[in-house]
Amino acid sequence: MRRGSRSFKNAPAVTDIFAKECARIKGCILQVVQSDDLSFCDQVKVLTNSDIVASPCGAQLTDMLFMDRESSVMEFYPKGWLEYAGSGQYAYHWMANQSGMKHQGAWRDPMGKECPSPKDRLQCFLFHKDGMVGHNETYFTEWVRRVIDHVRLIKLEQASTNQANEQQHDSKACIC
């Protein structure tokens, strides 16, 4: 989570959506943190043990590099980001893909204040950069469900593969 610019307008409602969807899956643990409350080492620990990071766009996403390959990233933007942020808005998408993670898409809030200087791209970017992120409960619920189910399937496949590998090593063959 973030505070201030690019934070959620209604963080408890967004957290509730994630909590409800996580509760559907045995073993799913939801951990909500404020990255600015954590030391760098604690941020690394949190992300190292996370399968999904869901966050508004911002520098806190840089630490996703410490997540496992096959982890998932969900990104959220305030109104105006698509129109004014330029190609930099894809930086975390590219980082996730290059690191072997799955960028599971982005929510670009369609609601919010209009830029007071629509002909000045820089002023509009700066205006929207400080905006907050709204949510759509139906869309978020379906999106979160898809991502959690995707991660669950990957984890089941990994567990199955690990179990098969362990069984091969448990055979009477010589293991050097």
Image (cartoon, rainbow, N blue to C red):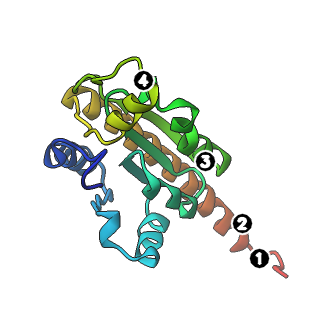
* Mark 1 crowdedness (10 Å alpha carbons): few <14, some 14-19, many ≥20: few
| Mark nearer the viewer, 3 or 2 | 3
Calculate the distance from the C-alpha at mark 3 to the C-alpha at mark 2: 35 Å
Mark 1: which secondary structure?
loop
Q: Residue 133, relative to residue 172: is it above or below? A: above
Residue 38: quadrant of the picture: bottom left
Q: Which one is in front, 168 or 151?
A: 151
Q: Position of residue 168 (x, y in %)?
A: 72, 66
Residue 45 is marked as none
Q: Camera-side residue: 155 or 34?
A: 34
Q: Residues within 10 Å of mark 3 (few under 14, many from 20)?
A: some
Give the residue displayed 42% in from the left and 42% down from the top: 74
- In 3D space, how far apart are the residues under numbered discs 1 and 3 (Cα atoms)? 44 Å
Which numbered mark, 4 or 3, is in the foreground of this view? 4
Whether tag 1 and tag 3 are in contact, CB under 8 A, the answer is no
Which badge, 1 or 3, is on the more N-terminal residue?
Answer: 3
Residue 120: mark: 4
Q: Label 4 amino acid?
A: Asp
Label 2 sits on what residue type? Gln
Q: Secondary structure at mark 3?
A: helix
First of labels 4, 3 by sequence position: 3
Q: Badge 3 is on which residue?
A: 95
The C terminus - image quarter: bottom right
Lower sequence index among marks 2 and 4: 4
- Left or right: residue 160 versus residue 75 is right
Of circles 2 and 1, the one toward us is 2
> Which residue in the structure is indicated by mark 1?
172
SS label for mark 4: loop
How far is mark 2 from mark 1, CA to CA?
Answer: 9 Å
